[in-house]
Amino acid sequence: MTEGRPAAEGRPSRPARLAWGAVVVILLGVVALVTYALTHVSSPSAPAQPAVTSPAVLATLSSIPVSTFDTVGVTAPGTTLSPPSVVAPQVPLIVQGKPDVLFVGSEFCPFCAAERWPLVVALARFGTFTELHDGTSAGQAVFPNTSTFTFDGVSYTSRYVTLTGVELFSGTTAADGTFTRLARLTPSQAALVATYAPQAGGTTAGTMPFVDVAGQLVAVTSGFSPALLAGQSQAQIAGLVAEPTTGSGSTGTPIPPTGQAVIAVANQLSAGICAATGQQPSAVCRSKGVRAADTALGLPVPAANPSD
Amino acid sequence: MPTLRWQPIASLVLSVYGLGASIYLTITHFEPKALACVSNVHFSCEKVTQSPQSEIVGIPVAMLGLAFFVPMLLLCLPAAWRSADRRIHLARLALSVTGVGMIIYLISAELFLIKSICLWCSSVHVATLLLFIIIATTSPIVLAPGYGTFDEPPADGDQS
């Protein structure tokens, strides 16, 4: 034991008493703190987990006919698209031996919300989302409450490509008014953003969304305006994507070119993925819609499918 | 003169543990997927290490842990414990007081702001608290006039 006790006197010295007193005070403080927290502060509720995306919505987005992609091509009437940039040759972006699609965004960000739609549609042509959750952009920002998904906790399987979804911040604010940090970029991801975001017109830091399509394409904003998604639920948007029509609805209200925009951007993103997968699968990569995107973006154009 | 027995070794072991855990938490601060930890409603290392409170003026708390345990480890080496230089013992005491103040803040943040407990962090808090207890209770000895200025008496049977 500590020997701060002069044996001759048989009682602790004054410094020793002070030291032990300080220790006791600190220990009592810690015990009081924990006791107070356990007895007076409400039990922490389970963190609000975003809802799992409806299987019906996911099925809709995963079963869009090739003919729809081919019909739409790379344009959407009445709206301007922002295609991704073909960047200078990158070190191949490979994860688990496959080309990787890196998405960096935040749940609060409306442009990220818009970009997830064509990305989900494009990736669904190459594989399967086994876990995807709903999301909405922040209510206090521009294009508030835009319906979308979150890639936080996403699970995607494919023979051809992997998805790395990084959601940096939450979509809702905590009690202190700040968005909760969900993730941070790894050094290699940060290096990709710093290197390629400027080439695509973004900045070296803080660019959201940042989408690196398997080292072939980089997008630093959404492919279309989030305004096209305004006021629509996730199911409504999925319906427009599945049947991208224009004109007027039954009530005479103009139908926004939401579906065309999502499909067109999905074709562009698909073209980037195809460039990295060696044009596999051919049913996707040699389709008319993807080849139109190849041409528009300046990517190598494979031969058409024999059936086309 | 009172002597120290197990305290130098115990403090060294705690410092090594604290340094290792701080290195791990620093890595996982930047690479959350590398974090292996119990995660449920009450416990979540990820929620704590990625919370706004995980940084102080932009510096990750885990790195502050490194900045605490590196000098603490040096100050808890046996040679440092034996030193007659009072400044070494005062520095160790000051550092341990700073550490315990810091963990009181961090425990409060976990309990009241983040409302989740990080078990890795808690283990570092316990190590810091134990270090404080050891250092505070030995300070009257090592800060006493004349400490370390003479060798320990030879053990029984030692003929040298």
Image (spheres, coloured by chain):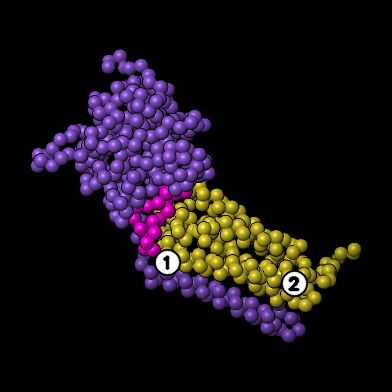
Chain colours: A purple, B yellow
Residue A70 highlighted magenta (yes or no): no
Range shown magenta? A167-184
Residue at 31%, 22% in the rendered image: A287
B112 sits to left or right of A52: right
A63 sits left or right of B121 in the view: left
Q: Secondary structure at mark 2?
A: helix
Assign the C terminus of chain B to one quadrant of the image. Answer: bottom right
Q: Foreground: A98 or A8?
A: A98
The image position of residue A64, as x and y in percent, is 25, 30
Residue B44 in percent (x, y) is at 44, 55
**Residue position marked by numbered label 1 in the rendering:** B112
Circle number at residue B86: 2
Q: Position of residue A187 (x, y in %)?
A: 53, 44
Q: Chain of mark 2?
A: B
Q: Is residue A194 left or right of residue B143?
A: left
Under tag 1, what secondary structure? helix
Q: Residues within 10 Å of mark 2 (few under 14, many from 20)?
A: some
Say which amino acid is labelled 1.
Answer: Phe
